[in-house]
Image (cartoon, helix red, strand yellow):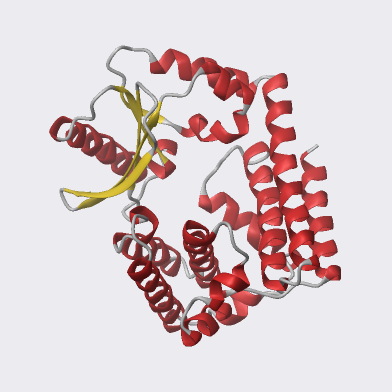
Amino acid sequence: MEERKDVTDFFVSLAREFLDEWPVSNMVCAYAGGSVGRGEADTYSDLDLHIFVEGEDDPSCENRLFKGHMIQLQVQSAPTDEEVYENPWAWRYLKEAKIILDPEDRFISWMNDICAYMDSPAGKAKMFAQAKAEVESFHEEAQAALMEGFPYSAYLASWAGWIGALQMSAFFQGHSLSDAQLYQLLQKEGRSDGMDGFFLETYRSNQDVQDALMLLADYRTYLRSINKGIEFALAGENDWLVKRKVQRLQERNQLDMAGFLIFSEAIWLYHSVGLDEWLENHWADLPAKLSLSLQKLGFFQADGQLLAHLRHASAEIIAEIG
């Protein structure tokens, strides 16, 4: 525990040094999210640095290498009270924020008020309703995909709904947004995802994990070659970042969770370039060998029975929350 505190303190200092050397104009505040925000950083962590600024500029995300460490820098307009109170589930990550800079002492008191609302009965009820509606929307999307003849897209949407239900459990019962909390729930509920232990069976050795990492890097490289202007998700630095997270899991002998992480990263890449098209259409635009290989990362075809199973599993998880 002491080691995690030392690593977290290091990243907080690093963030302040970064902002001293690379100040952001019109900054309202800066905070760290992720493992640093939770105080759980370890030697495999990177720094998620969020900046709120005055004005209505479009949000931006980029990877910045600073003093040998990767900083994932995200800059966006400071939200209004109305935006947060209207959609608190979308801002749930503020509950795990660690203040880096608050030049005018505006953010700390504001954040405390926001977190108090999220912890109130009214705030919890609203967040629960919004999260549940989000899960349901994924399952509706899955039904639509299946009706249009896209079974892979149907499975992916329904699986996303199931994952959303697990994230609700992690947040409302485990009081955490960490990957570790989600992994614990995945291992507990893994047999209800329709994959029948796919990750456990597929990732039996470190070589299996390395092969999947190489495939993921090839996918990112190809997408980068044909998509200009999508710099954050497709940046080569992300291969290094995901490799670091995988190494943490390999050290813990959680090879199945490493496979899950790689699968999740592949989904993120797909959504970064093909959000408006079904997965099958996206694959059709890829080289045949790459497309066929990606399917082996964990993409399944769904039928009506599997969609009903995942929807029921999601409902059971949500019902346990209360």
Give whichever of 319, 284 is nearer the camera: 284
Q: Residue at x 43, y 43 (%)?
A: 34
Q: Is residue 291 above or below residue 251?
A: below
Give the quadrant of the C terminus. top right
Q: Position of residue 280 (x, y in %)?
A: 62, 73
Q: Is residue 148 left or right of residue 87?
A: right
Across and down, in percent, residue 218 comes to: 38, 76
Which residue extends farthest bottom? 289
Question: Which residue lies at the image location 57% right of the left edge and 18% below the top edge?
Answer: 82
Point out the image quarter for the N terminus.
top left
The image shows residue 219 at horizontal and vertical percentages of 42, 73
Q: Quadrant of residue 192?
A: bottom right
* Residue drawn at 67 percent across, 23 percent down: 123
Using residue 91 as the reference point, say whether residue 19 is left or right of it.
left
The number of numbered discs placed on residues in the rendered structure image is 0
Horizontally, residue 286 falls left or right of residue 5, namely right
Q: Quadrant of residue 202?
A: bottom right
Give above or below for 39 relative to 286: above
Residue at x 51% of width, y 64% of height:
270
